[in-house]
Image (tube, helix red, strand yellow):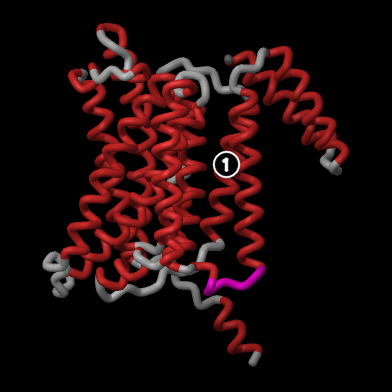
């Protein structure tokens, strides 16, 4: 028995060829998407200098080549991400999407000269840790044999109720809140993008299943449900891009990118739980762990949003409080000194 247990403990033989393909595609996707935020922001700034800014309803960016470069870069990233799911499981692919936040924040600091304080960095870390915790404890996807099965899941009462809530919330945000608060509250634009995005991902998954089955010899293009999902994808993506452009043109990219990732990921997981009944196949420990991930995400989002415009004096005060809390929680003085040196370095660099 000991020999058998020892053999089982060392039975791992490394990643399969398909998983390596999925890993490479996912890493490529994160790079392209992270860079696209910066290129599009440069294009929006250039277009806004000679026309009506996107943040106040202008569409002059459509005539700006640099914005189209960013758009094409994002499309390439999304295609790579879509293809990654065909080769590797979601538990491998999805956490790597968090790398786009780091890439976007670093490029914004270097290229756009957008200041990212240490608490912004800490907020990004919390967002990534929380999102990774949720995804790593997510259940395996159920096997689907036909696009009709996905349609049946999408038309069950629970998901129809969720979709109705999302559509209602989006219309309320667009009609009532955006005219009044769109230029001052980042969560308004990001809320529309994230809510619509949760529906678009479910439709993208359905469309991906249909294409995968079709390429394997089971033609799904003859079903009207496939084309219905296609229409939903196109409508949702256009809406997302419109309001994401407004958010990027109005607010700091280093803040837009992580908040959008956090909200989009959270709502997408919620939509998947409702539609595919993921929690029915999980034990209480896994569910509690996922909820802890949500709390971590909310903490990171709050930290990012509340410290982005603080002065250096206030940031220094918060840093002292943070270090005192670390000491109270049992961290060594050496660790706290390392944080102090890091804080001084970051402050001087900025």
Q: Residue 244 at x, y = what percent?
A: 37, 31
Measured from the top left, where is residue 47 in percent x and y?
27, 14
Picture residue at 50% right of the left edge, 35% below the top: 258
Spot occupied by residue 28 in the image (x, y as percentages of width and height): 33, 44
Residue with the mark numbered 1: 127
Please tell me in which quadrant of the rendered image residue 314 appears: top right
Near-viewer residue (117 or 239)? 239
Where the N terminus falls, by quadrant?
bottom right
Instruction: Name the residue located 41 percent from the left edge and 65 percent from the top edge.
Output: 15
Magenta region: 280-284
Nearer to us in this view, 236 or 291: 236
Q: Is residue 114 above or below residue 11?
A: above
Q: Please say whether residue 283 is one of the residues in the magenta stretch.
A: yes
Res 269 visible:
yes
Classify residue 74 as left or right of residue 95. left
Residue in the image at 23% along x and 16% along y:
60
Considering every residue shown, the one lying at the far bottom of the view is 1
Q: Residue at x 62, y 52 (%)?
A: 293
């Amino acid at each position: 028995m000991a020999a058998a247990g020892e053999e089982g403990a060392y039975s791992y033989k490394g990643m399969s060829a398909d998983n390596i393909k999925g890993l490479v595609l996912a890493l490529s996707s994160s790079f392209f998407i992270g860079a696209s935020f910066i290129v599009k922001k440069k294009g929006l700034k250039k277009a806004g200098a000679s026309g009506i800014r996107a943040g106040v309803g202008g569409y002059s960016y459509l005539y700006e080549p640099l914005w189209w470069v960013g758009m094409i870069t994002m499309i390439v990233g999304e295609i790579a991400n879509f293809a990654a799911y065909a080769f590797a499981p979601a538990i491998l692919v999805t956490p790597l999407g968090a790398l786009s936040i780091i890439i976007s924040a670093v490029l914004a600091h270097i290229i756009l000269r957008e200041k990212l304080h240490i608490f912004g960095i800490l907020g990004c870390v919390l967002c990534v840790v929380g999102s990774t915790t949720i995804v790593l404890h997510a259940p395996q996807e159920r096997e689907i044999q036909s696009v009709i099965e996905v349609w049946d899941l999408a038309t069950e009462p629970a998901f129809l109720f969720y979709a109705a809530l999302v559509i209602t919330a989006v219309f309320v945000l667009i009609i009532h809140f955006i005219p009044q608060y769109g230029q001052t509250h980042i969560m308004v634009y990001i809320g529309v993008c994230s809510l619509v995005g949760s529906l678009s991902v479910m439709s993208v998954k359905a469309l991906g299943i249909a294409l995968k089955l079709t390429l394997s010899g089971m033609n799904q293009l003859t079903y009207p449900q496939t084309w219905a999902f296609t229409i939903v994808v196109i409508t949702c993506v256009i809406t997302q891009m419109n309001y994401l452009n407004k958010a990027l043109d109005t607010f700091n990219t280093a803040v837009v990118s992580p908040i959008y990732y956090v909200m989009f990921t959270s709502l997408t997981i919620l939509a998947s739980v409702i539609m595919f009944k993921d929690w029915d196949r999980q034990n209480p420990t896994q569910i509690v762990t996922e909820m802890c991930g949500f709390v971590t995400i909310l903490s990171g989002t709050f930290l990012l949003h509340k410290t982005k415009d603080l002065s250096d004096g206030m940031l220094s005060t918060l840093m002292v409080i943070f270090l005192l809390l670390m000491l109270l929680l049992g961290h060594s003085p050496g660790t706290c000194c390392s944080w102090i040196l890091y804080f001084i370095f970051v402050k001087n660099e900025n």
